[in-house]
Amino acid sequence: MQDLENRDRAQRASRRMALATRVLMAIVLLAPVVAAVWFAIDRAPFEALARARFGPTTSLSSALQLTLIAAVLLVQAGLLAAALNALASAFQHLAARDPLNASAARAMRASGMLLGLATLAAIALQVPLSYAVTMLNGPGARAISVAISSGHIVGLFAAAALIAIGHVLTLAAEVRADQKQFV
């Protein structure tokens, strides 16, 4: 009886997490669209942010510049959305009648790998993003920058944890399959 209650509780929690993850994925995908609309309406806050980071001569006015910035932001959003989609899929598989299954394990590992890729891309894409923002600056005022923040470290740690959980789920699914054969 207690096992059924625990399984039901785990399945409900997994369904909720799948929904929450999909909502977060939608927000990640909508953020660049909202930013683009906001930029089209009033670019002053974005230029103020760029000037604060890269100097007073920084301007966001070239079509090429804006295209490069949009491309970088869309790549980052797409990679993060793919990781969140894989994680939501893992939660959906965990909400299944038999939560210890190979599909959940594969989706969990995939979400970890995609999150790791998204985090590494967020670090690497700082180079083209910083160049795109400062490309109209005069000689000596252009910049290329890369930084690793605590958010990147947490992202990589979370990616490794998801991959490890996926491996544990694989073992649990194998044990569960063996157990079913004996019964």
Image: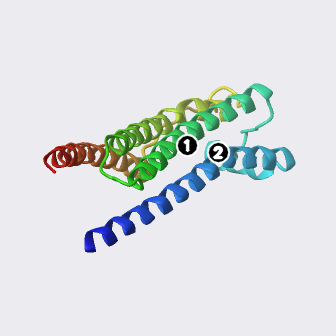
Task: State the image quarter where residue 143 is shown.
Answer: top right
Residue 19: image x %, image y %? Answer: 54, 57
x%, y% of residue 157? 33, 49
Residue that label 2 marks: 29
Nearer the observer, 97 or 68? 97
Name the image quarter holding residue 101.
top left
Residue at (48, 49) in percent of width and height? 88
Q: Are marks 2 and 1 in contact (CB under 8 Å)?
A: yes
Q: Is residue 24 left or right of residue 58?
A: left
Which residue is located at x 36 percent, y 50 percent? 158
- Name the residue at 38% across, 55% down: 97
Judge the density around disc 2: few (<14), some (14-19), many (≥20) Cα neighbours within 10 Å. some
Residue 51: numbered disc: none
Q: According to the image, label 1 marks what residue?
A: 81
Which element carries disc 2, helix, strand or loop?
helix
| Front-most of residues 78 and 8 | 8
- How many marks can you see? 2
4 vs 127: above or below: below
Task: Tell me: 97 left or right of 122.
Answer: left
Query: How much space separates mark 2 and mark 1, taking CA atoms?
Result: 7 Å
Residue 116 vertical placement versus 153 (above, below): above
* Relative horizontal placement of residue 91, taking residue 100 as reference (left or right): right
Q: What quarter of the picture does the N terminus occupy? A: bottom left
Q: Residues within 10 Å of mark 1 (few under 14, many from 20)?
A: many
Answer with mark 2 or mark 1, whichever residue precedes in sequence.
2
What x and y, as percent, mark residue 67?
73, 29
Residue placed furthest toward the left: 182
